[in-house]
């Protein structure tokens, strides 16, 4: 195994697809080792932010923050992205011809070895890489002996450096047949093309040429399987994308092949191409960000011992969420957004879109009327206070207005405007909002008729009298209730309370519009009631139907949506691009509509409600969420690995205590009953071990099920193994050991006679690992897998009375 540590200098962890990774493995002190911690101590604890610590060589000062001479300047700074992997280099066994997948080299000894017996031109190993000079008029390369086969096999490589400058710098990674010029592989050529080639006579008229990306094409793989050759690329050596496939050429099934890495150029100054980790299988161990770069000295030896934290570092420092109504609008990317939730002593209301639109100020028409902020309860699920407009008449009172500036003006002119707002009134004939160009030539007003019917008014000629189009399906809007409005000018569709009420309205488009009025228009038709969450969007496509879904955010806080959907929704609020969902049991979740708590706290509420597991991915910027049924009734076929007790590191012990005991649960939900479940026999034997649950269920029966699930598992927990340490480096099954993650399970067999059983299956709750030179010790934190087993009628394993007859929840 070869350690691989990469830094994303200048990249942002929240923008993973833009990170260019730099290999700094040569700087890592592998005597001290890399220490990684992940997951939870046990199944009843929350998973913790993943951490990593490692010591780096800083003799050249390259890792000293602020050092302008550093090749990484000015990006040696806190929150720099980091990823840590193990690269497993294959070993050769058997006799030639060998599968090409057995060819491996990490180039770490800086000496060209016997694997590359046919090298030509100027090649070397430098800094743990294969370096190939790109010299004018000369092709140089690494070349193996002819003793490999591609059929049913594959080869991979990390393309670390491409040649540049001069005329036609190029480098190739090729599998060669016996016939000169018949070959399969990748060829890079300036000014930035990567060709997937299947050559005959050194030519391929059907080659697939990609625009080369040092991020997306960092890793290359050639693979043959079942009569098809695949050209694949990867940003991490772990997740692969097929770039080309082709029926396998005949020579692949007959010829012993060579592998060649070459470089050259037609003219210009010599530089080089670099390759690394030929044949490596990558096992991600950590993905996160560096907390600090503290420079230390031992005498004159300078080192930097860095500590790192995963995605949860960023999530935990995010501000508290606003209401779901507000978060949905912000997540949709408005050009201007005025929630109107300012406190009562404010004299203006601000834009939260991030586009720096100015605040709206209170305008006065005539003498009299009031506009009171934070005076009316907003839509039910928001628990917000919104402004109350109380005019003396339709022409005497107050409203809000401002010129939003050229930024918003340009967006709404070059793109199609979309309007969104919440409103409440018992008075018809008034204007909700208006948008106009500064010269008043282009005007659009959204208002109610005297009878409470929605209408849209406009002019494109500056006329004082506006043309009006009423929407008969949107009637009864003066009922004093909150209503949600969306008008998409791209389609001229209108939605009220999540229902489409108009399609293809004949309303003319406007230009240069940026003067926004809320609660009236030009001193007339002043609103009597409340308005909130006014947003303006610019779009190049139909988005109104999506924006209309925001109605449920305000009216119900998405109560009743399944847990996996809720987790993904909350992740979007935090700009987390991916959530990997595992399992199929996802119950409905109650409203989380009001603001005031952080995104992690809300996700944890869902996790605890569902007895699920939430944690950061170890291979990318993303989250993983597992439903409770991921752990139901594990089978031998699904085991990560099995291990002999003799192969465990010292320190194995069984626990039989009351640490996890729960025999009385009092549970409740928002707006529901408080209920209690007990295990009388456990209470009689051990005394009460109570616990309370306040969970986001949508029915009392679900609350009761959750309480029973907890008591049935922990009223009398059996002896269990809570720690298992393994030296993975020495294990024949080390690849499987490295694959084990949270909720994986494995079996330990040949336990001593004094153990509760001769074999034991345990579930991984978390782990700590230490990676050193020729050592990789993983200390798994485990729980008894049987704890999560559920009843299967007439099953010999899962229908054992008082043992595995627990009803599924």
Image (spheres, rainbow, N blue to C red):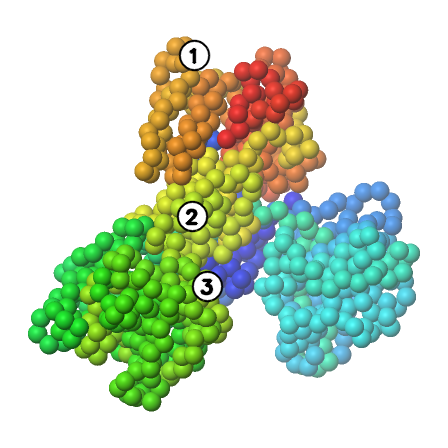
Q: Quadrant of the N terminus?
A: top right
Mark 2 neighbour class, 10 Å CA radius: few under 14, some 14 to 19, many 20 or more? some
Q: Residue at x 82, y 69 (%)?
A: 199
Q: Position of residue 347 (x, y in %)?
A: 16, 66
Q: Residue at x 66, y 59 (%)?
A: 241
Q: Position of residue 617 (x, y in %)?
A: 52, 47
In the rendered image, which residue does mark 1 sit on?
681
Comparing 431 with 551, the one in front is 431
In the rendered image, which residue does mark 2 sit on?
312
Indicate the secondary structure of the residue bearing disc 2.
helix
Q: Relative to 548, does residue 675 appear above or below in the rendering?
A: above
In the rendered image, which residue does mark 3 sit on?
545
Q: Relative to 247, does residue 566 appear above or below in the rendering?
A: above
Does the CB distance between marks 1 and 3 fall below 8 Å?
no
User: In terms of sequence position, does the residue under pointer 3 or pointer 2 come before the other?
Assistant: 2
Q: Relative to 379, does residue 120 appear above or below in the rendering?
A: below
Indicate the secondary structure of the residue bearing disc 3.
helix
Res 354 visible: no
* Residue at the farthest top position: 685
Indicate which label's residue lies in the foreground, 1 or 3: 3
Q: Residue at x 56, y 36 (%)?
A: 630
Q: Position of residue 165 (x, y in %)?
A: 63, 78
**C-alpha span from label 3 to label 2:** 33 Å
């Amino acid at each position: 195994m070869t350690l691989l540590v990469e830094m994303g200098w200048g990249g942002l962890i929240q923008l993973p697809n833009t990170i260019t990774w730099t290999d700094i493995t040569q700087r890592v002190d592998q005597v001290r080792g890399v220490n990684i911690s992940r997951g939870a101590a046990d199944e009843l604890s929350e998973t913790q932010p993943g951490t990593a610590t490692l010591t780096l060589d800083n003799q050249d000062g390259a890792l000293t923050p602020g050092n302008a001479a550093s090749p990484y300047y000015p990006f040696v700074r806190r929150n720099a992205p980091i990823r840590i992997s193990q690269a497993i280099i294959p070993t050769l066994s058997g006799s030639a011809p060998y599968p090409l997948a057995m060819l491996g080299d990490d180039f770490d000894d800086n000496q060209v070895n016997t694997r590359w017996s046919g090298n030509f031109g100027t090649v070397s190993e430098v800094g743990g890489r294969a370096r190939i000079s790109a010299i004018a008029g000369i092709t140089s390369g690494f070349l193996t002996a002819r003793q490999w086969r591609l059929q049913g096999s594959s080869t991979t490589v990390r393309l670390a450096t491409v040649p540049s400058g001069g005329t036609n710098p190029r480098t190739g990674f090729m599998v060669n047949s016996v016939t000169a010029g018949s070959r399969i592989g990748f060829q890079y050529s300036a000014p930035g093309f990567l060709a997937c080639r299947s050559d005959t006579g050194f030519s391929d008229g059907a080659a697939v040429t990609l625009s080369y990306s040092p991020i997306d094409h960092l890793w290359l793989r050639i693979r043959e399987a079942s009569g098809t050759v695949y050209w694949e690329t990867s940003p991490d050596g772990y997740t692969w994308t097929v770039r080309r496939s082709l029926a396998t050429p005949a020579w692949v099934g007959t010829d012993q092949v060579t592998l060649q890495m070459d470089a050259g150029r037609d003219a210009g100054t010599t530089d080089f191409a670099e390759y690394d980790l030929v044949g490596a299988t990558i096992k991600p161990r950590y993905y996160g960000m560096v907390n600090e770069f503290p420079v230390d000295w031992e005498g004159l030896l300078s080192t930097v011992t860095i500590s790192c934290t995963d995605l949860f570092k960023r999530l935990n420092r995010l501000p508290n969420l606003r209401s779901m109504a507000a978060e949905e609008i912000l997540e949709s990317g408005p050009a201007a957004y005025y929630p109107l939730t300012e406190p009562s002593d404010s004299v203006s209301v601000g834009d939260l879109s991030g586009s720096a639109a100015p605040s709206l100020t209170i305008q006065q028409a005539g003498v009299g009327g009031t506009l009171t902020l934070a005076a009316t309860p907003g839509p039910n699920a928001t628990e917000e206070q919104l402004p109350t407009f109380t005019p003396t008449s339709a022409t005497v009172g107050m409203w809000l207005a401002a010129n939003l500036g050229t930024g918003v003006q340009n967006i709404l002119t070059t793109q199609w405007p979309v309007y969104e707002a919440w409103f409440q009134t018992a008075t018809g004939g008034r204007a909700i909002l208006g948008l106009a160009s500064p010269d008043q030539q282009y005007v659009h007003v959204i208002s109610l008729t005297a009878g409470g019917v929605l209408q849209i008014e406009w002019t494109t000629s500056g006329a004082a009298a506006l043309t009006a189009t009423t929407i008969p399906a949107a009637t009864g809007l003066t009922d004093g209730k909150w209503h949600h409005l969306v008008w998409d000018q791209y389609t001229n569709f209108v939605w009220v309370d999540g229902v489409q009420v108009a399609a293809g309205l004949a309303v003319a488009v406007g230009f240069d519009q940026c003067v926004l009025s809320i609660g009236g228009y030009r001193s007339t038709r002043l609103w009597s009631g409340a308005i909130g969450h006014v947003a303006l969007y610019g779009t190049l496509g139909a988005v109104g139907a999506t924006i209309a879904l925001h109605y449920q955010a305000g009216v119900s806080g998405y109560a009743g949506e399944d847990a996996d959907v809720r987790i993904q929704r909350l992740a979007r609020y935090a700009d987390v691009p991916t959530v990997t969902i595992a399992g199929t049991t996802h119950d409905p979740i109650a409203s989380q509509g009001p603001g005031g708590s952080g995104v992690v706290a809300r996700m944890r509420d869902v996790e605890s409600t569902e007895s699920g597991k939430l944690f950061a991915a170890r291979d990318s910027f993303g989250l993983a969420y597992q439903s409770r049924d991921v752990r139901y009734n594990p089978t031998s076929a699904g085991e990560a690995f099995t291990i002999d007790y003799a192969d465990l590191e010292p320190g194995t012990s069984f626990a039989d205590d009351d640490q996890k005991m729960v025999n009385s649960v009092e549970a409740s939900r928002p707006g529901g009953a408080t209920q209690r479940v007990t295990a009388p026999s456990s209470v009689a034997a051990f005394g009460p071990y109570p616990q309370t649950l306040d969970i986001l269920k949508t029915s009392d029966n679900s609350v009761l099920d959750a309480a029973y699930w907890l008591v049935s598992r922990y009223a009398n927990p059996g002896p269990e193994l809570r720690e298992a340490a393994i030296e993975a480096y020495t294990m024949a099954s080390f690849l499987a050991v490295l694959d084990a993650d949270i909720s994986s399970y494995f079996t330990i067999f040949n336990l001593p006679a004094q153990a509760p059983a001769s074999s034991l299956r345990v579930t991984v709750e978390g782990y700590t690992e230490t990676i050193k030179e020729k050592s990789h010790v993983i200390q798994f934190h485990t729980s008894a897998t049987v704890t999560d087993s559920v009843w299967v009628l007439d099953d010999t394993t899962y229908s054992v009375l008082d043992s595995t007859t627990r009803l599924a929840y």
